[in-house]
Amino acid sequence: MQKKIKKCSGCRPSRRDLLEKRDQWHKDIHRGITPGYRLAWLARLDALYLQKLMSEFDLGPGMIPYVNELYRREGQTQEELARCLDVNSSAAARSLAALEQRGLVERRVNPKNRRQKLVYPTEKNFAMREKFFAALEMNNEMLLRGFEPEEREQLMSFMSRMLQNAIGALEED
């Protein structure tokens, strides 16, 4: 009998519940579980590990892409960020509001179009930049621990092909 993950209304499973569930996953691993199932579990566990690494910055997994993108190209509009990260504008608004509340981004009026606001990282954000990228690198190393360089390249190639398959399937509709 599989152990059910305890949930409170509207909450995601806790880290402890997911780690307890991992034991069942280890039993199931050799039963031909689908790639989608494994990828979903990997994404959930990776998000938990990344959350642990980013806790000193008070960043949840959903905020990381925004911080990363603003380091890459600051001064984007909310709409540009949403499009770049492939999220809807209301999700972008919520994430940016949370980052703004934490003092990590600020919105400034666009001098070329006063109706628009451009999003910039704050000094507090820039102060954490080096540690932020170090945490991302630690996360990548955790995922690829024990893989030889050729295996890492092969894995990335396989993942790229899987992404192309998924994109192609969505475009068929």
Image (cartoon, helix red, strand yellow):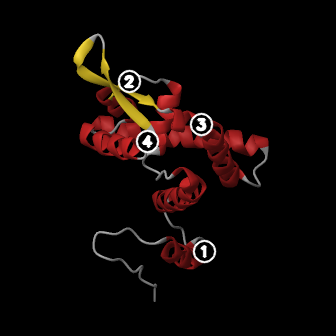
Relative to 36, does residue 119 appear above or below in the rendering?
A: above
**Which of the pair 39/33 is nearer the observer?**
39
Q: Quadrant of the C terminus?
A: top left
Q: Which residue is mark 2?
A: 76
Query: Mark 1 or 2, which is nearer the eye?
Result: 2
State how far apart marks 3 and 1 are (Cα). Answer: 40 Å
Which label lies toward us, 3 or 1?
3
Q: Earlier in the sequence, mark 4 or mark 1?
A: 1
> Please, what secondary structure does the residue beneath circle 2 have?
strand
User: Mark 1 sits on what residue?
Assistant: 26
Residue type at numbered disc 1: His
Mark 4 residue type:
Gly
Left or right position of 145 against 119: right
Disc 1 secondary structure class = helix
Cα separation, mark 3 vs mark 4, equals 12 Å
Looking at the image, the residue that sits furthest to the top is 112
Q: Disc 4 to disc 1, how far (Cα)?
A: 41 Å
| Front one among 38 and 32 | 38
**Image depth: mark 4 or mark 1 in front:** 4
Q: Secondary structure at mark 3?
A: helix
Tell me the residue at 48%/37% (across/down).
67
Q: CA distance from mark 1 to mark 2?
A: 44 Å
Asked if residue 78 is positioned above or below residue 51 in the image, the reply reads: above
Q: Residue at x 49, y 44 (%)?
A: 64
Q: Horizontal and vertical percent for residue 114? A: 23, 16
Residue assigned mark 4: 103
Q: Earlier in the sequence, mark 3 or mark 4?
A: 4
For badge 2, the amino acid type reads Gln
Residue type indicated by callout 3: Ala
> Mark 3 vs mark 1: which is more N-terminal?
1
Residue tagged 3: 127
